[in-house]
Amino acid sequence: MVDPSGSSPRAEAVVDLAAVRHNVGVLRRAAPGAAVMAVLKADGYGHGAVPVATAALEAGASWLGVCTLEEARALRAGGITAPLLSWLHLPDEDFTEVVATGVDLSVSSPRHLAAVLDGARRAERPARLHLKVDTGLSRGGAQPADWGDLLDGAAKAQADGSAQVVAVWSHLANGDSPQHPSLDLQAARFTAAWRAARERGLTPIRHLANSAATLTRPDLHFDLVRAGIAVYGLDPLDRQPADSPLRPVMTLRARVALVKRVPAGEGVAYGHEWTTPCDTTLALVPLGYADGVPRRMNRAGRMRVLLGGALRPVVGRVSMDQVVVDCGDGAAVREGDTAVFFGPGDGGEPTAQDWADELGTIHYEVVTGVHDRRVARTYTGVAG
């Protein structure tokens, strides 16, 4: 996105597509015997689904995955024709359009199967099905006791030409803990479910591994691995970028709107939780909780941004639209300068993992919280 005035955006998420291609390469080398699915739900985890999809495919990903039908439609509308799986739906949704455009669909119950087959009849095209079995996460997927009924319905649909059973799949509960005993239990249940499908004459591929299992559990790779967070360079094992083979893709930054001297003893921001201890220079940076900086981020006063060549503290509360940075003497800071909130860490800036640690959450939440409603996306590393 480029500002038509020619100036840099007020606030921007810089998305490095070369890093996306690097990360997909890491995943392909980690799972050489399996195809790689790049997961693009939540608009590419806040990075932009269509540009990330393009970069991932350029790097050798052969499948794409999304959550909702709307996300699948957006990729198809964006010119993405690669194999695409959508997996979380209500049973009363209209599947006609996505079947017609060749989107694969996850099915977890006979009612879901009937709805998808209705869409296939309307589209006059067989539905491509990924049958999901619940192996222990207890979210989506058919329970083992109901699996046989789902298989029988899917096998009948394939026999009458209204569907093709492409895959059997499931999802790990503790994939980020490679030695957790639940992984082996889920793998055993998964294999039993796949064998039951084979016994009915079906020949589905298998996919179970997420990003963490792709990097740590080759026994769970099967035919296809589904990589989400690792595509975006955020390590699923919570390693900092310096210790990970992955490269963070997003840098969040904003330009300083105002610089001013403030005397000692002045309260700063709502509630006056911070007061200037001495005469100081404050920089107003227009990025707040409406832009993806959680209000609780500075609850202990430990938030820092890279500004004017140094890490400087955010003081006072995070507001909806802005934060205030204490620059001390402030000789190195001017209006229009760029404050880096998080990035790869190469320049000394905080990382998304640093934010996650401060917030007591995961880096997934940090990057998906950055929306393009007010934060421009700028793409670098575009192929060609």
Image: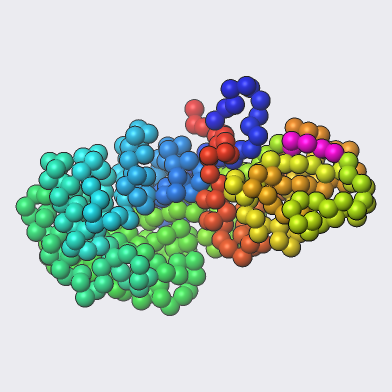
Q: Position of residue 193 (x, y in %)?
A: 24, 69
The residue depicted at 88 percent of the width and 41 percent of the height is 261
Dominant secondary structure, magenta: strand
Horizontal side of 116 relative to 301 (left or right) equals left
The residue depicted at 55 percent of the width and 50 percent of the height is 369
Q: Nearer the viewer, residue 296 or 307?
A: 296
Q: Position of residue 136 (x, y in %)?
A: 35, 73
Residue 12 drawn in magenta: no
Q: Nearer the viewer, residue 319 or 338?
A: 319
Q: Quadrant of residue 365?
A: bottom right
Q: Give the magenta range.
A: 256-260
Horizontal side of 110 relative to 222 (left or right) equals left
Horizontal side of 265 relative to 201 (left or right) equals right
The residue lying furthest to the front in this view is 271
Q: Position of residue 335 (x, y in %)?
A: 78, 33
Q: Quadrant of residue 150?
A: bottom left
Q: Can residue 166 be seen in the rendering of this structure?
A: no
Please tell me whether residue 149 is drawn above or below residue 106 in the rendered image: below
The residue depicted at 15 percent of the width and 50 percent of the height is 118
